[in-house]
Image (tube, grey):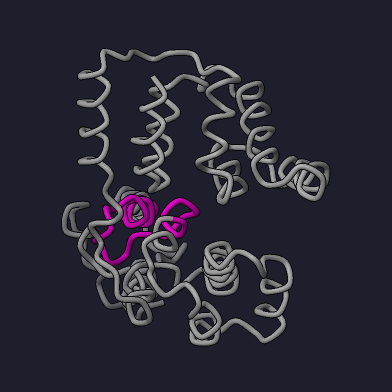
């Protein structure tokens, strides 16, 4: 009970929208707690308050976040990894982000020949360990990057113009094209496969079967073939190049267009 203090009517959804959930939610919920002993005259008000309380939660979750609060998903972490110049600092970054010595050793053991992948896996492990801190504002304390790297609109427009100038539509990709593409992209074949949608188990099978005997290019080529079978509707030039740009591989997209 509230010592018979009269509970004010709930504010409109618009005014609730701007409240800070973390600081005020507990206090708001306490203020809106209704006793079952209240008289019948307050039934409609109580029901309205309960509805507003539920709506408050939904609105806060759906509320558009500021750029500093953007949640860093796989794609964004990959773009950050690609843009960062000093990849050999990944261990120092891992320590700063709270990774354990064991975490760092495991990453180094598994990806020792690929600094880019080590850096990326370091960020993934950090997100797994501290999901509540996985936003731009927190990460910017440790990395100096411009948020403009998250926007691919200009690159997309550039690609559209290139496709127009070459009079290239959405051509179906051939095995010959994939062999050409694998020569350019083989160093990052596993990361490409991951972001094209292939499962980690599939990539590991390709690596196990072809890496020692045939090398990275064959791994990349086989990855493209499997991807084109599993994602048949995406295996067209236009779609493929846009996916490369989304992964911050604009230079690959431009080079691959020279094939036509």
Residue 14 vs 163, above or below: the answer is: below
Residue 252 lies left or right of residue 137; in this view the side is: right
Image check: 191 left or right of 253? Answer: right
- Residue 79 in percent (x, y) is at 40, 56
| Residue for point 47% across, 72% down | 87
Instruction: Please say whether residue 66 is one of the residues in the magenta stretch.
Output: yes
- Residue placed at 65% from the left, 26% from the top? 225
Residue shown at the point (41%, 31%) measured from the top left? 256
Q: Name the residue nearer the viewer: 17 or 99.
A: 99
Which corner quadrant of the image does residue 66 belong to? bottom left
Say if 144 sits above or below 194 in the image. below
Q: Is residue 65 magenta?
A: yes
Q: Which residues are magenta?
A: 54-78
Residue at 39 percent across and 62 percent down: it is 80
Q: How many numbered tags mark residues here?
A: 0
Dividing the image into 4 quarters, which one contains the C terminus?
A: top left
Residue 16 image position (x, y, % from top left): 22, 60
Residue 205 occupies quadrant: top right
On the image, which quarter does residue 157 sit in?
top left
- Residue 184 visible in this rendered orientation of the protein: yes
Q: Is residue 40 visible?
A: no
SS majority, magenta? helix
Q: Is residue 168 left or right of residue 74?
A: left
């Amino acid at each position: 009970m509230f010592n018979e203090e009269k509970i004010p009517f709930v504010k409109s959804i618009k005014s609730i929208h701007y409240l800070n959930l973390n600081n005020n939610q507990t206090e708001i919920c306490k203020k809106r707690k209704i006793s079952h002993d209240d008289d019948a005259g307050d039934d409609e008000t109580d029901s309205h308050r309960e509805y507003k309380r539920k709506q408050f939660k939904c609105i806060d979750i759906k509320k558009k976040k500021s750029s500093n609060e953007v949640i860093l998903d796989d794609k964004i972490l990959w773009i950050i990894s690609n843009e960062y110049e000093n990849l050999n600092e990944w261990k120092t970054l891992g320590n700063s982000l709270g990774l354990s010595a064991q975490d760092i050793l495991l990453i180094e053991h598994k990806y020792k020949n690929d600094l880019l992948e080590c850096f990326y896996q370091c960020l993934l492990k950090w997100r797994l360990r501290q999901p509540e801190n996985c936003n731009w504002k927190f990460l910017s304390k440790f990395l100096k990057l411009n948020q403009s790297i998250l926007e691919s609109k200009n690159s997309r427009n550039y690609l559209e113009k290139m496709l127009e100038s070459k009079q290239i539509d959405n051509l179906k990709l051939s095995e010959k094209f994939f062999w050409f593409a694998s020569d350019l992209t083989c160093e990052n074949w596993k990361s490409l496969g991951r972001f094209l949608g292939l499962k980690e188990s599939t990539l590991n099978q390709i690596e196990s079967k072809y890496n020692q005997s045939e090398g990275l290019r064959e791994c990349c080529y086989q990855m493209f073939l499997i991807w084109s079978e599993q994602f048949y509707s995406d295996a067209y030039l236009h779609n493929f190049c846009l996916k490369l740009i989304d992964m911050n591989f604009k230079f690959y997209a431009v080079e691959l267009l020279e094939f036509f």
